[in-house]
Image: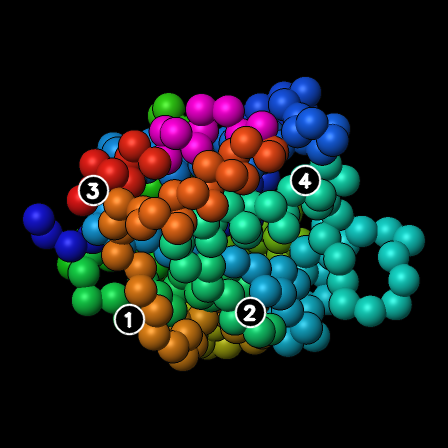
Amino acid sequence: MAERLMLLDTPSLYFRAFYGLPDSLKAADGMPVNAVRGLLDMISRLVTDYEPTHLVACWDDDWRPKWRVELIPSYKEHRVARNVSDGPDVEETPEGLVAQLPLIREVLASLDLPIIGAAHHEADDVIGSLASQAAAPVDIVTGDRDLFQLIDDATGVRVLYTARGMSKLEAVTDVTVVSKYAVLPGQYADFAALRGDASDGLPGVSGIGDKTAASLLKEFVDLDGIMEAASNPSSSMSASIRRKLTAAADYLAVAPTVVNVVRDLDLGSFESRIRPLDTDHEQKLKKLADQWNLGGAADRVLKAYAARG
């Protein structure tokens, strides 16, 4: 069987699981377990339907890195929890989900599934580094369009996009990005910087939306080419667009560093091959399932892993 690496944007998935299942799913002590059960069922389905040989749970060790915020202070600012004591920014997360995060990590560990994060970096950066350094084709499972910049048909990197739900996953390739946005995946980060992204607190360039951003990239290739044309009165760029870009020059000088995912993190070595669980891991998972009322989700993921043997 040909090898294929699957990278889970774990925060994206557990948020989706939390909001996708009712919080009436609870353990005996009253703690909701909807995110845990939903995430397990997502993993079962992904392993069964897409048959990866390797699987990694990528984690946000720092969901809002200081070095990104220093460049663009509005970066994810709207997601910062209010009335939190001095210290690192805390993401505004439902209390019921916060309570489940330690259990999510414990359950993933019982699956012998590597949980990989990096200090001062987001899960996106872990995904970018693992995808860029992988020797095999890669499936990235996420609801985050920022990761479209990693798509590359030539190296077999695609995104399994969860925006429409796990039952309607969309395999996003070069052709998909071009048809939806009229830019290549390699241009997507510049495209996002130009048009902005409210979900990440990126202001973009005032007056430049999707169509204008795409047309600029079609003519001038990348942000450097666009800014070079903006500074050249004899270029084919219209005066009004030139003024808009010039007014946003300071933002555009730093936006690529914020928007581009990091691709060169040294994440060390770890085992990610999917195998049927050994007795110790299987017993640990079953114990957690009994203790936390994980229902049939644990059985389904065990079945999915067993089929990969």
The answer to whether marks 4 and 3 mark residues whose Cβ atoms lie closer than 8 Å is: no
Of pointers 3 and 2, the one earlier in the residue sequence: 2
Quadrant of the rendered image containing residue 251: bottom right
Of pointers 4 and 3, the one earlier in the residue sequence: 4
The answer to whether marks 3 and 2 mark residues whose Cβ atoms lie closer than 8 Å is: no
SS type, badge 4: helix
**Amino acid type for the residue under numbered disc 2:** His
Q: Locate residue 271, reporting x and y percent.
A: 31, 64
Q: Locate residue 120, reporting x and y percent.
A: 60, 73
Left or right of 53, for residue 191? right
Q: Label 2 belongs to which residue?
A: 121
Q: Label 1 belongs to which residue?
A: 133
Of pointers 2 and 4, the one earlier in the residue sequence: 4
* Measured Cα–Cα span from mark 2 to mark 4: 21 Å
**Amino acid type for the residue under numbered disc 3:** Arg
Q: Locate residue 27, reporting x and y percent.
A: 66, 29
> Label 2 neighbourhood size at 10 Å, few (<14), some (14-19), many (20+)?
many
Of pointers 1 and 2, the one earlier in the residue sequence: 2
**Amino acid type for the residue under numbered disc 1:** Gln
Q: Label 4 belongs to which residue?
A: 97
The answer to whether marks 1 and 4 mark residues whose Cβ atoms lie closer than 8 Å is: no
Q: What are the residue bounds of the magenta stretch?
A: 293-301
SS type, badge 3: loop
* Measured Cα–Cα span from mark 3 to mark 2: 32 Å
Q: Locate residue 163, reporting x and y percent.
A: 46, 33
The answer to whether marks 1 and 3 mark residues whose Cβ atoms lie closer than 8 Å is: no
* Measured Cα–Cα span from mark 1 to mark 2: 17 Å
Q: Label 3 belongs to which residue?
A: 308
Quadrant of the rendered image containing residue 154: bottom left
- Disc 1 versus disc 3: nearer the observer: 3
Instruction: Give the residue displayed 36% in from the left and 29% down from the top.
Output: 300
